[in-house]
Image (spheres, helix red, strand yellow):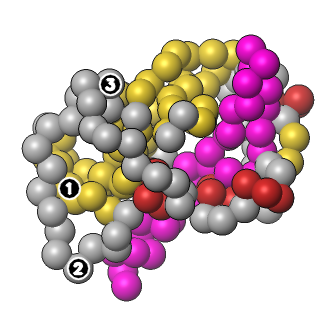
Amino acid sequence: MSVSFHDNRFITFTINNEIYAIEVLKIQEVIYIPEITKVPGAPDFVVGVINLRGILLTIVDTSMEFGLTRQPDDRYNRIVVVNLGGDDRVGLLVDDVSEVVSLDVDAREPLPTLQGGRLALYAHHIIHHDDRPVMLLEMERIVDAVSWGAAA
């Protein structure tokens, strides 16, 4: 499936010392981590839910879903609230939010096979920025995974 990007501005963040990016247009906000309510029977990668100004928001542990080692919680952890329109919202638990950058999406390359694992379900492309690889996340796939997990 070919993914098109509508903007060249991305918010970057780290998960387990790797850099990831999501289009700015898909970000609603970045918040500190409030109290999270566990949901019995939820998939392992769903940390729980929070009440975000009257909206119930599912929180995904991105490191767990990507098959990475979870870093210890610290003061830099944040939740990136992604809004794809309508009720398609999810909160991504990340280690640290870095910055908003302009990326040349035409310079993206396929994600190397060795990255594989569950991450390959959500990121198909990589871009080099400041001599570091940045993985472009396809948010629609993450929202779909949360929806499928909730339906299971």
Q: Residue at x 60, y 32 (%)?
A: 19
Magenta stretch in the rendered image: 123-152
- Where does residue 117 sit, x and y in percent of width and height? 66, 65
Magenta highlight on residue 17: no
Q: Residue at x 68, y 51 (%)?
A: 123
Q: Nearer the viewer, mark 3 or mark 2?
A: 3
Q: Residue furthest bottom?
A: 152
**Marks 3 and 1, Cα distance to the nearest angstrom?**
20 Å
**Marks 3 and 2, Cα distance to the nearest angstrom?**
29 Å
Which mark identifies residue 76?
A: 3
Q: Residue at x 63, y 49 (%)?
A: 138
Q: Is residue 100 left or right of residue 56?
A: right
Q: Is residue 82 above or below residue 117?
A: above
Can you identify the residue that label 1 sits on?
49
- Which callout, 2 or 1, points at the residue further toward the start of the chain? 2
- Where does residue 57 sit, x and y in percent of width and height? 25, 51
Give 36 or 88, whichever is nearer the viewer: 36
Q: Quadrant of residue 25?
A: top right
Mark 1 Cα-neighbour bin, 10 Å: few <14, some 14–19, many ≥20: many
Mark 3 and mark 2 in contact? Answer it, CB < 8 Å: no
Name the amino acid, label 1.
Answer: Val
Q: Dividing the image into 4 quarters, which one contains the C terminus?
A: bottom left
Which mark identifies residue 41?
A: 2
- Which callout, 3 or 2, points at the residue further toward the start of the chain? 2
Name the amino acid, label 3.
Answer: Tyr
Q: Residue at x 80, y 49 (%)?
A: 111
Q: Dividing the image into 4 quarters, which one contains the N terminus?
A: bottom right
Name the amino acid, label 2.
Answer: Gly
Mark 2 Cα-neighbour bin, 10 Å: few <14, some 14–19, many ≥20: few
